[in-house]
Image (spheres, grey):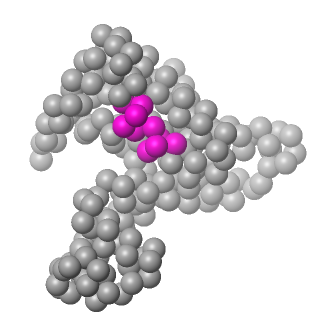
Amino acid sequence: MATPAPPRWDRKMQQRLARGEEAALGELYDRFASLVHAIAHRVMDDDTAADQITREVFGYVWEHPEAYDPKNGNLRSWIAAVAQRQSVHRLRSSAVERTVAGEGCAAGQFEDRVREASTAARADFIRESMPASIRATLDLAYIKRRDYRQAAAELGLTEDEARRRLRLGLQMLSTAIEQPSLPRPPAGPGSAS
């Protein structure tokens, strides 16, 4: 099955970045900085590290707009993958530093933490990417603790529609656990050259 063509905005943004348009980087940052920061924070559990990773990711995007391949998906997914990869790289590097300093944990515990953080970051990304109608239904059910009947009433839906949206949302979230990682972008921050 062929990958659908990316939105026109993605292609135009890549072209603008390749031409060195600073305004394009500003627009991209405004649109995706919160996504990148959320992924980095979920993995690192540290605001300062998440801020640094956010800067690194957008620095990489600015310096290497050609690394984005529209055939592999949309720009948002690529940026999320770069953020995920850089965050995990930073987490592993900090664990090595702590181990050398005698403060580290066992390798198995560390890898478990990396897997848990990666799964949580993927789940956050999937939740933010799903249609607003499905996300709103999930939020009512799992954040505000409404049952499907209450969610249906609050959203003005039939009970069948509320159940359908919940089931679809949960199916989408289940992919965060089933997939080993986000799609790997071409070489980026933290990768060996």
In this view, 159 is above or below 96: below
The answer to whether any part of residue 167 appears in the image is no
Point out the stretch of residues depicted in magenta: 28-37
User: In screen coordinates, is 103 left or right of 92?
Assistant: right
Q: Position of residue 12 (x, y in %)?
A: 21, 23
Q: Where is residue 135 in the image (x, y as percent from the top left)?
A: 32, 65
Q: Position of residue 43 (x, y in %)?
A: 58, 50
Furthest toward the top, the residue is 19
**Point 16% across, 42% down: residue:** 3
In this view, 59 is above or below 101: above
User: In screen coordinates, is 41 left or right of 101?
Assistant: left
User: In screen coordinates, is 174 left or right of 118?
Assistant: left
Is residue 36 rendered magenta in the image?
yes
Q: Where is residue 70 in the image (x, y as percent from the top left)?
A: 23, 31
Q: Quadrant of residue 4 in the image? A: top left
Magenta-drawn stretch, dominant element (helix, strand or loop): helix
- In the image, 173 versus 161, the foreground residue is 161
**Point 39% across, 23% down: residue:** 25
